[in-house]
Image (cartoon, rainbow, N blue to C red):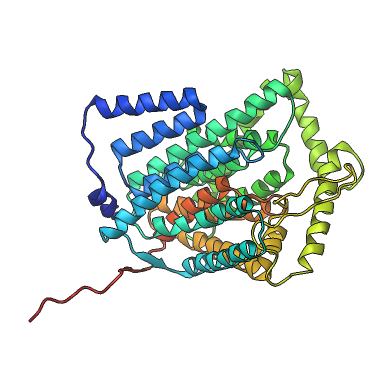
Amino acid sequence: MSASVSGAATAQVRVSSGPLPFLATLALAVAAALLVNWWVGTAVLALGLVLITRPFDPFIALLLCASAAAFAAYGDRSIQRDLTVVLVLSIYATASFALAWRCRTWSLPTSQVSLALLGLALTSALGTAHGLAVKNPFRFICLELFPLFSLSYSLVIGGMRLKPVDLTIAGWTLAAVGLAASSIGFHYYATTGMRTGGLPFSPIPGFIGLIVLSLALFDPAPRPRVLPIAVFCVLMAHQVVTFTRGFWLGLMAGVPVVFILYGRRGAGARARWTKVMSTVGLAGLLMLGAALAAAAHPRWGEMIALMGDRFLSSFETKNTPETVSNIVRLVEARTAVQAILKAPLLGHGHGATLVVRQFFHPQTGPQWWIHEGYIMIWFKQGVIGLVGLIWLLYSALRMGIKGTSHPDRQVAGWCAASAACTVFAIVVGLTNYFFFVVSQSFLLAFVWGISLSASEPEHRPIVWRAAVKPPG
């Protein structure tokens, strides 16, 4: 993409140079960290630096949203605070988009993905109206609608012209986010020896690992570079430590997708597959060294055996600690399907809850989530919402695959990453409800937006009224 984000440049608000804006931002960030927590302070600091260096740039604003959303701690009491921070950043991104639109530097990209996003938006609006009509809990409606709405931000990036430097900034930023998210999981496992859900063991490092791998392969260098492959290994190690079968299966599908999209057939295929094998060998050596080092520590040494037991129990329903989650999901799915059959077409509306009676507990409280993402959207939006989601995933996957033929290797790498992340999300959706989580939705919107922009779709300027011709 040689064209620039000229709209963002012309729409930016000039900020005075000098140390004063930076010092003021730093003071606000420190105050937020002391009064709330380090995460809010970091978000304030990041927003302040963006306002100083790249004010009201929609691409950078959405990169900031995706980075902050990666640390939203679902399942924690602080989720409302975390989502408030993400919402504030989303408002800033929306204002940046509105300014670019006003300056005529953004136009609506028209493609199959755009239509699919519009379709999911319509089914989500219908599900919201349904939920409000039957008086479902308003807080659950908002909790579910925010991630689905955020997928539409891919249209913002898709309607822009992107610079190579923007894609480079995005790659390094997301790699840093992935390493930070991984460090939280490593620290938790090292100090407790246990796995848990939520922030420490989220799929975000897996998503970002696929992006890092794709960019490393599509790099014009004939041999893999050590640094990005080392980052990829760290992110994959985190996904192993999560002991989450859905993440493992997602990566088992996503990583080969990257290899196939890069290697393929045609001119230069032999050299490309040689680079793939070199990358696999380098990653294997790094992981082997890490495994040997970990084996010296008793807690980490047990991990390999635990990982094998966990994977082998993936399809069992015995009453054992390793298979409890399988039973919980089956009971939950049965309860959800029974509810779906009562309203299969329109569902029960956003905000609807289930009371799942488990074998291990007399009765649980009402829950807004269902671990199987496709059953969850069917329960909320009915079969029309399920079809809308599947159509969107198919369209995004198809768009990413086509984009890998782009002549710019950096752009092609992002398109391959978009396709691989879509595959990862499709597989993880079979065991988790991350379609209703902002950490996944903002990241998908970001990579889909880059892939949409790379496809060079037809653009339609949107104006409130036609220009008035001068008299005469």
Q: Nearer the viewer, residue 378 or 191?
A: 378
**What residue appears at the point 66 percent right and 29 percent down from the top-left corner?**
288
Residue 372, image x and y in percent? 72, 54
Apparent side of residue 231 relative to residue 198 in the rendered image (left or right):
left
**What residue appears at the point 61 percent right and 53 percent down from the top-left corner?**
138
Q: Nearer the viewer, residue 364 or 49?
A: 364
Query: Relative to residue 316, is residue 393 depicted above or below?
Result: below
Residue 200, image x and y in percent? 64, 33
Q: Residue furthest right?
A: 319
Residue 136, image x and y in percent? 67, 58
Query: Relative to residue 44, is residue 356 depicted above or below?
Result: below
> From the image, which quarter does the N terminus lie in?
bottom left
Q: Residue furthest left?
A: 472
**Residue 398, picture quadrant:** bottom right
Q: How many numbered badges does the structure rendering display?
A: 0
Residue 448, image x and y in percent? 48, 56
Apparent side of residue 101 relative to residue 416 in the rendered image (left or right):
left
**Residue 165, picture quadrant:** top left
Q: Nearer the viewer, residue 69 or 285?
A: 69
> From the image, which quarter does the C terminus lie in?
bottom left
Residue 70 seen by the camera: no
Apparent side of residue 81 relative to residue 471 in the rendered image (left or right):
right
**What residue appears at the point 42 percent right and 23 percent down from the top-left corner?**
30
